[in-house]
Amino acid sequence: MKGKYVWLATSVVLVTGLDQWTKLLAVEKLKSGRGVDVIKGCFQLRYVENPGAAWGFLAGANEAFRAPFFVAVSLLAIAFILYFYRKVESDQKVMLVSLSMILGGAVGNFIDRLRHNYVVDFIDWYWKDWHWPTFNIADSAISLGVVLMVWTMLFGEEERKTVESEKLKAESRTEGQPPAQ
């Protein structure tokens, strides 16, 4: 039981640390100028201040509403993730990893909201004039965590039942036999 919380703390520190470090680099290297091409024609690093949520949701809302709203939503999300994490069994490794990634990303973006009232984004995928919404490491961790969680919820339970069934079969075969020495 204790091991899953060590995993959580380690993962959150790593994801949040990587997120904040890359955002610091983005501020230092990208804020004053144009984007830096990584793969010309489809991928660049470009500094963006996002006062809203995903895809700029509520970016144009009055700051008196938006700032406290996103702080409250972030705190509720963090509390919900921690509550849900507590309920997950230690052997549900993929679910533990997914929730750790989501929490690390939520904490990373929450730090930005507290410090700046916006989130620093810098990863820009595009094709010609079409741009996917610019994002950051925290957003990537959240997205990957959600995909893993959905995958586990859809397919993981069946896998878990199969493993439990195999354990029961193995136990029933060994019943009545003397313990191995």
Image: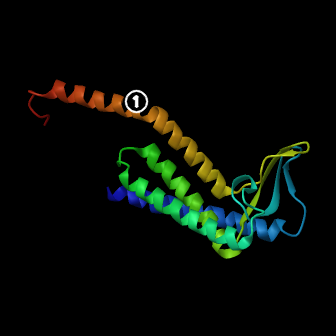
Q: Is residue 43 visible in this depiction of the protein? A: yes
Q: Secondary structure at mark 1?
A: helix
List the residue tagged with mark 1.
158
Q: Position of residue 147 (x, y in %)?
A: 57, 42
Q: Against 80, is 164 above or below? A: above
Residue 176 appears left or right of 134: left
Q: Position of residue 36 (x, y in %)?
A: 86, 57
Where residue 106 sits, quadrant-wise, is bottom right
**Residue name at image x 26 percent, y 31 percent:** 167
Disc 1 marks which amino acid?
A: Glu
Where residue 20 sits, quadrant-wise, is bottom right
**Residue name at image x 90 percent, y 66 percent:** 33
Residue 137 appears left or right of 95: right
Residue 137 appears left or right of 149: right
Q: Which of the colour schemes (rainbow, by chain, secondary structure, one colour) is used?
A: rainbow
Q: Position of residue 6 (x, y in %)?
A: 41, 61
Q: Residues within 10 Å of mark 1 (few under 14, many from 20)?
A: few
Query: Residue 40 or 148: which is nearer the viewer?
Result: 148
In which quadrant will I find the N terminus?
Answer: bottom left
**Residue name at image x 34 percent, y 31 percent:** 161
Q: Against 112, is 56 above or below? A: above
Q: Against 20, is 88 above or below? A: above
**Residue name at image x 72 percent, y 56 percent:** 57
Query: Residue 84 or 156: which is nearer the viewer?
Result: 84
